[in-house]
Amino acid sequence: MSYLKADEQDESQIKKFGIGDLKSFFILFSFAKGYLPKYIMSLGLIFLGSLSVMISARSLGKLVEHIIAGDKDQAWVFAGMVLLFEAVAIAFAWSGRRFISKYSSFVILEIRKRLFNHLQNLPLSYFDRQPKGRIITRLTHDVEGIEDFFTGALGKLIQAIFMIILSIGAMIATDFKLGLILTLTMIPGLFFIFATKKMVRNASRRMSRNSSALNSKLSEFLDGMEVIRAFGLEKWSQNEYGESIQEYKTSMLGANSLFAWIRPVLTLLVYAPLVGLVWFGGHSVLEGTLAVGVFVSFMRYCERFAGPILGLAREIQVIQSAFTYTERVANFLKEPGEEVALGTDGMLEVPIKGEISFKNVYMSYNEGEPILKDVSFNIRPGEKIGLVGRTGSGKTTTISLLSRLYPFQSGDILLDGNSIKDFKRSYLREQIGLVSQDVIVFKGTLRDNLTDNIIGESVILDACEKTGLTHMMKRANLTLDSEILDGGANLSVGERQLLALTRIFIKNPQILVLDEATTNIDPFYEELIHGAVFKAMENKTCLIIAHRLDTLKRCDRILVFSDGRLIEEGHSNQLFENKGHFYSLHNAQGLS
Amino acid sequence: MVKDGSFNIWLSFLKKRGPIYAVGIVAVLLTNIAQVATTRIFGFLVDFFSSNKLPSFFNFDPSLPLIEQRHIFVHLFWLLLGTRFLLTLGRFGWRITLARQTHHSSSFLREKIWESVAYFKLKDLDRGFTKGVLMNNSNSDVNSARFLFGFSLIALIDVVFLGVFTFWAMLTINVELSMVSLIVLFYLPIIIKKLTVVEIKKYEDAQEHLSQFDDLTSQSVSSIRLQRITQTGKYWVERLIKRADQYRNKRLSAVFTNLMFIPVMGAATFLSFLVLFVMGIGYTLNGTMSIGDFVAMQGLIVLLQDPLGELGFIISEWRKGFTSLDRLNKIYLNEKDSSLLNKGTALIKQDYILEVEHLGFNYDHGKEIIKDLSFSMNQGDRLGIKGPIGAGKSTLVKLLAGFEREHRGVIKFHGKSYDEYSHIDLRKGITLVPQKPFLFAGPIRQNVGMDYKLSDQEIWYFLELADLKSDVEGFKEGLDTELGEWGINLSGGQKQRLTLARALARKPEFLLLDDCLSAVDTVTEEKILKNLDRELSDSSLIWVAHRDSTLKYCNKILAL
């Protein structure tokens, strides 16, 4: 959970950039823009509800006055008023709160849509820079914090504000002086909420941090159970876990001590107007300047706003964290998209033959650390090319540049004679099919996993036939409609890889890239897959990256990379005889 | 509902902390008395203001002008103020004593989980007690069970006493009105209990959808590169939004259920006013009840709603709490792996480090994976095991390392079966490096040493053996570089090499390497193999690999 810590450091950074509470409040509401009229209607309902509560409280005072006066008929009229307005208040408050929750849920969906679309538009370099966990936090945890505010706290906040304003208004209208005095007695309570805000926030933050630390520790130990067994670390793990629990407990008890005095004191202060009413109002009654009935009404007013203020104090954290989350989400949405990193998108969308040439390409992810240095080569349409070299030698970067995932600093890359910068990026990428060692398989039918478009059965089956998936399906007793488990749990590594390959073949790309696609596969499947590739990609360009050099024997040519440079080029046998870099790589594998 | 086992856990925890619980209960009582007293004082005030009778100890003469008896008003005021402070004190009291036990018990329950799970049989972790189940237990079950020791207990005491006090105070004012109010309000606990059950279910359902959605989101972030290259991003966005909308619906439904409490509680206020007016106005007008009593009664009925409403929550909370505690208790009571607790006899070195005779193995009812296998190893031997996927290489390694003991035939380590040694002694001598590297969050230093105290020099030596030294030297923080799920991303090969270094740091006499360098490029692998062969000349090694090149230092090869 170290990324949470990093996020907190981020927060202080955000403060430096100067997005304050007020600004994030506006950002929060800019998300809700389209729903403004609907929100106003909901607010109106809640307002009417609070107003009804006030009328009911005033009616109760009148009722008491008439009972004292012995006026039976009037007493019943006001009893009826109390009942009527209580009922109306409930109906308004309930429907208002329901509407707010409903519209808010759509606002949240809107935020999520925006985030997902933005995710698709961010340049890949952003993902290299940011830890994956942090991006995921933005998209899940942070949005959920905003969601808590919108669907829960917002309604309560509005209700509390209305209730406070209206009870102050009602008291001042009924008896100006007493009303004013009682309003003033509210101030210590509100002040207390703001004064303790920070303490409460720090305590809860410590709690949640230690609690997630504790969870990740347990999760880690469960994952690492085999290591714990293998090394006899049972006692060690108990000590480690015990330490985490101790930290967690300390923060929980710290929070307990804090809340133990904050909450009761807050309640005491929030009910201060009630005490003030007795002292000041009581004297007025004694002097005959205030009716007993008004005293009773005031009692009800004071009771009525105490609840919402206490509720607000409990929600203030949700509101505050919503501000923090909003800042983070807003900053994420401000990250520049691909058009900044890669420049304006090209327009070219012409059929591709598959002739690739790199012309003196230099590329670096970070300034001063070039990954590709002056790389030039030509590939004829339909050629099968192997790319070889140690980790970090530049093979994968070469392929990434071809797909326009990263910008390059100088030189040019031509596809059928046109610079790839002139192609429309999405079109270019559609022409290149890539299979890597990571295969994404999700829960659903085999068909769902193979294609997201409505494509004729024959096209799918044809591709399955080509890649040998049909053969595999027969062996594993699967049909296109068989259910595949999440992560492909009911498929073997090789089967998953075949699935990925078939998925690409259905799209019928003009250029195929295999990036270590067969590293985790035993020779039987590897042979099967390569056979399929060479058959299906006849006349189409293929680029194959592999560690195991014997898989590249069938390639027309092999490009050997070392330290960002292309150092050898030729057929496997020829390179072997040259006794260069390829030869030494080959020897290290102990093959003859 | 309450099984002996989990009830005993609860009871013995309470007994151990008896005095503090007693103090807490007194504090709750104090709070309740102060709450009821407040409403009574307001009743007295109104009676005083309208010149009605007050209890005799106030010495109030309704016939005299009020202004002459100002001291009675002042007394009432001080009584009110004193009550408010008492209330504050009472609340502070139970929070610092009883509420605190919630946290103490939560740590206690969590500690016991790992104390037990660390000794589970591995196959139990694959089946009944999977990671998902255990994580759920340690989160939601501990979270709901801990309340039994603190907050739920407070709520129960509070409800009982507040209910009784309030009702008693009402009875002293007017018996009939009190009885009718109680009967009318009795629907509250019943409906609220039902509503709570539905609400919890709906929130759980929403939570389930949320975690699926979160999973999909993290999958989407993880695969962003692939999406970009294959241009499947649009499809992912569609899928994500569809899931987000499903979750939105579920969550909204849960929120709506929660909002149902507004009309339900509102109806209680409405009904109490109805009863109060229909009966109370008549009683007040004909003099059965004073106006102060009427006002006090109004306050008391409002006060009575709380415990009755709470009762519904509390019943479901206690139910949920004990169900969770039962589930936790199942973990505590689950059978431990006896081989881990075995005292065992000392290890006496023999010529044959390993003797395998007629070894056979299959997982329950599965097909036979290993059939009648016999071989032996001397000290310093290097045995290579090869064979196609599914031939049982990893299973054999598990058997030879002594992790799986339910096999046919005999495996002897220094002349004795694994069952005759203690777990700790065995693990000092035998180390397995698995196929999939696993590292713990924490600095590299700790990941090499684990529970051993190693000097920096030693750590660097082991890193060098695994050819990771130059990599670590390249990190800004060197040995202190923090690793973690989300921290610095080591490459697959670096992870494998660090895992290897960690195993070497234990100076194993018998080392099993289960295809543990698959992600390391061939030049580096060659270097490492040479290092191992040279530096571990006294140790016996078993190498499993599907690249033949890996096995070139072996003096025996076993093909499965």
Image (cartoon, coloured by chain):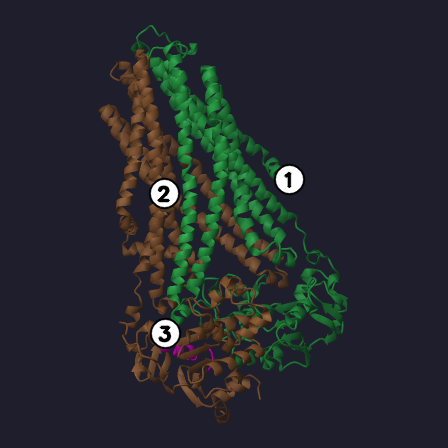
Q: Which mark is on residue B3?
A: 1
Q: Chain of mark 2?
A: A
Q: Would residue A264 appear left or right of A81 to someone viewing this image?
A: right
- Coordinates of residue A447 in the picture (x, y in percent): 48, 66
* Disc 2/disc 1 C-alpha distance (Å): 39 Å
Instruction: Say whether residue B301 is visible.
Output: yes
Residue on which disc 3 sits: A429
Of badges 2 and 3, nearer the viewer stands 3
Q: Quadrant of residue A168?
A: top left
Determine the residue positioned at 53% across, 37% down: B316
Q: Which mark is on residue A153?
A: 2
| Local SS, label 3 | helix
Against B59, residue B102 (above or below) is below
Circle 1 crowding by C-alpha within 10 Å: few under 14, some 14–19, many from 20: few
Q: Would residue B229 appear left or right of B506 to someone viewing this image?
A: left
Q: Would residue A102 appear left or right of A390 to someone viewing this image?
A: left
Q: Would residue A201 appear left or right of B341 to someone viewing this image?
A: left
- Coordinates of residue A266 in the picture (x, y in percent): 38, 34
Foreground of the two, B432 or A403: A403
Q: Chain of mark 1?
A: B
Determine the residue positioned at 33% across, 43% down: A100
Against A301, residue B558 (above or below) is below
Q: In the image, which residues are magenta?
A: A388-405
Residue B490 magenta-highlighted = no
| Local SS, label 1 | loop
* Disc 2/disc 3 C-alpha distance (Å): 45 Å
Circle 2 crowding by C-alpha within 10 Å: few under 14, some 14–19, many from 20: many
Letter of the chain in brown: A
